[in-house]
Amino acid sequence: MITILMFICICNAITEKQVKAAVAAGAHTLRQLQAELGVASCCGCCAETATDYLPGGRYAAHQTVHVLDDQVAPAANDGALPARFTEVIARRA
Ligand code: FES
């Protein structure tokens, strides 16, 4: 069996799995990731990527997706949409 590791921080050998675990355990700022894992504490090249795993980031486990109302056909049980945007919470597998 081959295990493929994706490294987020090369300087400190921090993997994506470690970053995701830290975020799942409650880290929600880059400073917290730095304190817990040491990510972005050397050259800093990984700071942006590590930040993408934090809540609201593009690789976050939960993302909020804004969908324009006019791009969504109302379902029979929708009723009136309360705002211009409908918020959908998507969970990545
Ligand atoms: S790659 Fe993370 S500090 Fe250098």
Image (tube, rainbow, N blue to C red):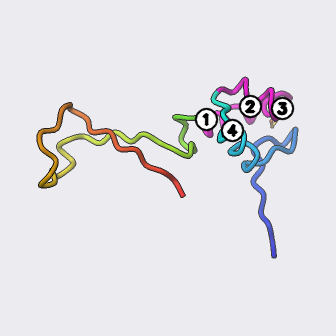
Q: Which residue is mark 1?
A: 54
Comes first in the chain, label 3 or label 1: 3
Can you identify the residue that label 3 sits on? Answer: 38
Distance from the alpha carbon under mark 2 to that under mark 4: 11 Å
Q: Residues within 10 Å of mark 1 (few under 14, many from 20)?
A: many
x and y percentages locating residue 26 in the rendered image: 66, 33
Secondary element at tag 4: loop
- Label 3 – label 1 distance at C-alpha: 15 Å
Instruction: Give the quarter of the image for residue 65.
Output: top left
Q: Give the farthest residue toward the bottom.
A: 1
Mark 4 and 3 residues: CB-CB less than 8 Å, in contact? no
User: Disc 3, ligand 1: is the CB inside 8 Å?
Assistant: yes
Q: Which mark, by number, is residue 25?
A: 4
Amino acid, disc 2: Leu
Q: Is 40 in the magenta?
A: yes
First in sequence: mark 1 vs mark 2: 2
Q: Are marks 1 and 4 in contact (CB under 8 Å)?
A: no
Q: Which residue type carries mark 3? A: Gly
Callout 4, which amino acid? Ala
Do tag 1 and tag 2 residues touch (Cβ < 8 Å)?
yes
Residue 9, image x, y percentages = 79, 41
Q: Is residue 63 magenta?
A: no
Q: What segment carries the magenta color?
A: 29-54
Describe residue 28's horizontal placement relative to residue 67 as left or right: right
Element on which disc 2 rests = helix
Q: Quadrant of the N terminus?
A: bottom right
Left or right position of 50 against 11:
left
